[in-house]
Amino acid sequence: MKTLKDRVIVITGASSGIGEAMAKVYAAQGAKVVLGARSVQKLQLLTGEIRAQGGQAAYCGVDVTKPAECRELIETAVREFGRLDVLICNAGISMRAIFDDVDLDVLHRLMDVNFWGTVNCCKYALPYLQRTKGSIVGISSVAGLHGLPGRTGYSASKYAMTGFLETLRIENLKKGLHVMIACPGFTASNVRFSALTADGSQQGETPRDESKMMTAEQVARIVGRGIVRRKRLCLMEAEGRATHFVKKFAPGFLDRMFYLVMSREPDSPLK
């Protein structure tokens, strides 16, 4: 694959943030995008916008925690465009609370969306992707490379995603399937505003300075290049690359650095 042109790409969590940016960027590059999210109204508007600009797009309302709806998303892609080349598992939620305080239901919700949502979509996409020697992309996080204090459920769900996708890659070594784990750092996107607090309510306002973060469009373009190059791991900025490197040689130092950075957030849950 030298370009995304004419590739059929399914994107979950496509109604906002990184997912929306990927839909627009890849459609502009000539891909045929199939958008999945819970908000059908937003998907309709985004699909209309892409088509109005000459792109090809379809959509399907989906709650990724429900296997039957994930199956329908994949079948929509095949019905509309006849094949499937790329599945991007982007749907996700975050959290902000230390384990001492958090309700266990919050951790279950994160696993249901971030981990099981990935598993559900991969289950139904896999036969089609094996046929095309296509790509599965998991949108993970720096929190999936090293434990992030105040984000126990988020880190756990991203680690689980990584373990699942790495195993899927190995099982399909002789079938030509490409599997990439993409790890953005802190990104300016709606997922941060909807992050769950200790009792499961949405935080509503991010404590971090959004202007200093990567944009969703930047993430989308980096992920797109990673798909074309069939990379295994897609690290996006100095923070991610440093985490990956330092963890190998000085994990204790990395623990202290992560604690220091997260404890300096406004209203940090770290005491």
Image (cartoon, helix red, strand yellow):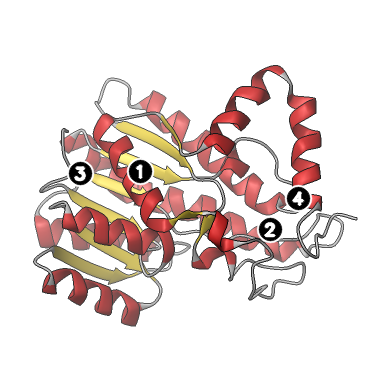
Q: Is residue 252 above or below residue 57?
A: above
Q: Earlier in the sequence, mark 3 or mark 4?
A: 3
Q: Which residue is mark 1?
A: 223
| Alpha-carbon span between mark 1 and mark 3 | 15 Å
Tell me which amino acid carries mark 3: Asp
Tell me which amino acid carries mark 4: Met
Q: Which residue is mark 4?
A: 262
Q: Is residue 6 above or below residue 159?
A: below
**Which quadrant of the figure contains the N terminus?**
top left
Q: Nearer the viewer, residue 28 or 16?
A: 28
**Which quadrant of the figure contains the C terminus?**
bottom right
- For the residue carrying disc 4, how many other residues have a C-alpha within 10 Å: few (<14), some (14-19), or many (20+)? some
Q: Which dot, 1 or 3, sits closer to the camera?
A: 1
| Alpha-carbon span between mark 1 and mark 4 | 26 Å
Please give the label number shown on residue 107. 2
Does dot 1 land on a helix, a strand or a loop?
A: helix
